[in-house]
Image (spheres, grey):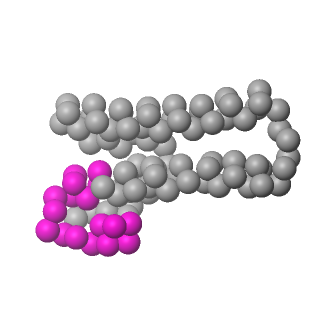
Amino acid sequence: TFALGPQLTNQSRKVRFNAQQAVLIDVALIFPSLIGEAVAEADANLPRAIMEPSSNFVWYAYVSAVIYCVVSNLRGKKPDQIPFISNWADYAVGPF
């Protein structure tokens, strides 16, 4: 869906934008997971006081983005205020 989503022109632009933004949010959250697994594999022995807040921040960021998108859609507004991700989704969907 990431590669083919923006090209499906039989859907409205808002639907394609929301789908692309959802995919980009998921992709953006893969990177902290990969970094956390790499640190765990490297046996870095980071203190728990660093690892838990980092994990919590990623979860709060994800939930906040999802809630923002749902509330914006329910209000009839385009959820285009997520930094970086909204711009990338808008660019991937294109002007049509």
Q: Residue at x 85, y 46 (%)?
A: 44
Asked if the stretch drawn in magenta spans residue 78, the answer is no
Indicate left or right for 30 with 45 as reference.
left
Indicate left or right for 73 with 92 as reference.
left
Q: Residue at x 23, y 38 (%)?
A: 73
The x, y position of residue 46, in whole percent, is 83, 38
Q: Quadrant of the N terminus?
A: bottom left
The x, y position of residue 24, in whole percent, is 44, 55
Indicate left or right for 62 with 76 as reference.
right
The x, y position of residue 89, in whole percent, is 38, 56
Per the rendered image, the range of residues in magenta is 1-18
State the residue in front, 87 or 33. 33
Image quadrant of residue 82? Answer: top left
Indicate left or right for 79 with 53 as reference.
left
State the residue in front, 35 or 14. 35
Q: Is residue 31 above or below residue 95?
A: above
Q: Residue at x 39, y 61 (%)?
A: 91
State the residue in front, 70 or 75. 70
Q: Is residue 8 above or below residue 75?
A: below
Asked if the stretch drawn in magenta spans residue 3, the answer is yes
